[in-house]
Amino acid sequence: MAVGTADTELRRLARAYRVETGYQDFRRRQVSASADTLVAVLAALGVDASTPGSVRAELERVEAERGRRMLPPTVVIRASTLGRDLAETFEPRSNVSARSRQEGQFWVEAEDGTGDELPHGLPHDLPLGYHRIHARYGGREESAPLVVVPDRLDPPPALADGRVWGFMVQLYSVRSRRSWGLGDLRDLAELARWSGRDLGAGMVAINPLHAAEPVPPMEPSPYLPSSRRFANPIYLRIEDVPEYLSLPRDERSRVEALAAPLRARNATLDLLDRDACWAAKRAALELLHSVPTTPERRAAYEAFRAREGTALVDFAAWCALADEHGPVWRRWPAELHDPRSPAVAAAGDRLAGRIDFHCWLQWLLDEQLGHAQREAREAGMPVGIVHDLAVGVNPGGADAWLLQDVLASGASTGAPPDAFNQQGQDWAQPPWHPYRLAEAGYAPYRDLLRYTFRHAGGLRVDHILGLFRLWWVPEGAPPSAGTYVRYDHEALVGILALEAYRAGGLVVGEDLGTVEPWVRDYLSSRGLLGTSMLWFERDRDGRPRRPERWRKNCLATVATHDLPPIAAYLTGEHVELRHRLGLLDRPVDEERAEAGEQVRGWLALLTELGLLGPEPDGREIVEALHAFLARTPARLVGVSLADAVGERRTQNQPGTVDEYPNWRVPLASGDGRPVGLEDLRKSGDVRRLARIITDRLH
């Protein structure tokens, strides 16, 4: 076969599996995916494209398989289209004739257990939720999950006509005098209560609190969790566990002794030590786990276990096995690689006590997460805590072990090269397998959303573009050698909107980076907010975008956790840092010049708008930038707590692992003093900044 024909068929096969054969980069240039990339990505999807013959065989197989199917794996339909002809729910490539589709028998099992036969169309009054549709004709029968989702997620009442601001916080970095070396859920509750009552804030947006490894070394990045469904017990405040009050005096003294050296670190700028914190907290929690509890507490715990079901026990089993064999499941004995194997079942019986301990930790987290959200709402916050959902999970962790059937192997998620990360990014996370996830009725995705929304006023979805397409990096290849794989965004966005609707929460999508032009309009039409970051907001001529030209349906911020705070951005320190770390793809002088020009452009606009006077100092620029955000029509305005106190160090430098202390930097002022929760309450700078924003929003 000619080379040209082979390449054409390979690209045709890629498109059949929604693998992009090219894309437009951040400079609006068209880039084609190489044949090697397409072969590797298809292999990660379980498709053999290694030879021209295998490509032809796969093309024939996929066409035949889709022709046999009557229904798609999962039917996701907007509420407004419920009355449509049932024929439209069929797999588009099905060989079943249109007449046969009309003459078939159909019925729906509703989520509440009721069901009706449907002669021609779906019922108009089927409620939002998770149902099941059945089809029968010609001696054949199929069924599929049927998910009815909102057309649009209406904003909470507080945002219908108003606007809200709040702090954006890396919780672990914000410590109080009683913290055990890291910010915790009591600190979150107190920050929400204080900023809501005293400053007029309407939300607190935090980093992901997803579960990490139960044994050292604990991954510092909150965006590379072991599980996205469950939470990290390192955020527990030990003294808020009711059983703590039942400890005898000598055992309470033991707990205090565990806490003392960690609390001493709160007054320093030493890098945050998660392993030391967790070792101390785990010792204390194991002590508390052995304390007899009241019948009421026991009943509440059992109710929690019943509600969370098998998923909780399976996660706890992974934790117990990680205690024994380490946190990377691929390094465990081979017989433990399958979570449904007899060996795992036997280990579950043997480790029942350890499994109960890890289940109990999740119950405590559920209690303290709920308390933080209640404190926020009682302080007058219309939104409260906005949680963060990471893109994916650690390949060695709990979710990667438990969800092997719906995650792809042989590739990881990332991002193509862009203006700030010129070599691209590899996030080392296995992507959802789009077809297996659909075959599972999207249940794993639904469940993690439901868990996160339970104690949240909102959810920020990191890299929400991944619900449309994800950049897959073949194993062993550089990030630049990846390509996009498309997902069913109608299903993923629809289920996200459904879970937010049921929880009464809002959704903020982080839609920065290489974005297809239509995606932001689509998200807005579905009632999901985007993210507009000041440094990146420019008109087509490259000039800073004036406030009245910003979009309304967004969270407006100056920067993100992946960029330096304002104090450092103004001086170009981020350029020097990336230069030292070898992350630049062009001469450093060019980067310096461009960064300086960008800052000068913004300062000129702030001056033109009357927000900045002559010869301003750094603090005045910080205040002017946030006054600018308040002047935009954005529904939400986010203020980085690092910017509020004058911090200069970034929390995360993309493209690095150990070269920079990512996610381990405690909150500090511009002059290098540690800033604790108590210091925030006394800070005139923080109060003045809050007043500037509040006055302009109302």
Image (tube, rainbow, N blue to C red):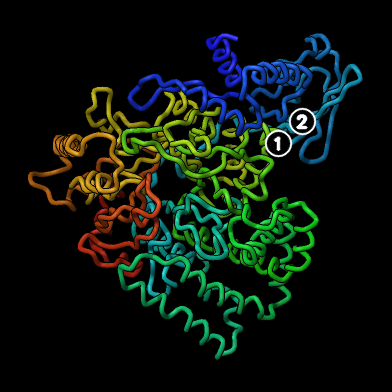
Q: Tag 1: residue type? A: Gly
**Chain-order first, disc 2 or disc 1:** 2
Q: Residue at x 30, y 35 (%)?
A: 536
Q: Where residue 218 appears, x then y in whole percent?
A: 50, 61
Tag shown at residue 144 = 2
| Left or right of 370 in this view: 571 | left
**Snapshot quadrant of residue 252:** bottom right
Q: Residue furthest left?
A: 614
- Badge 1 is on which residue? 441
Q: Judging from the image, what secondary structure is the residue with disc 2 in?
A: strand
Residue 578 in the image, given as x and y percentages of width and height: 28, 45
The amino acid on which the numbered mark 2 sits, given as a three-letter code, is Ala
Give the quadrant of the N terminus: top right
- Which residue does the image show at 30% across and 66% down from the upper left? 675
- Locate the C terminus and report the quarter of the image it occupies: top left
Q: Is residue 328 left or right of residue 405?
A: left
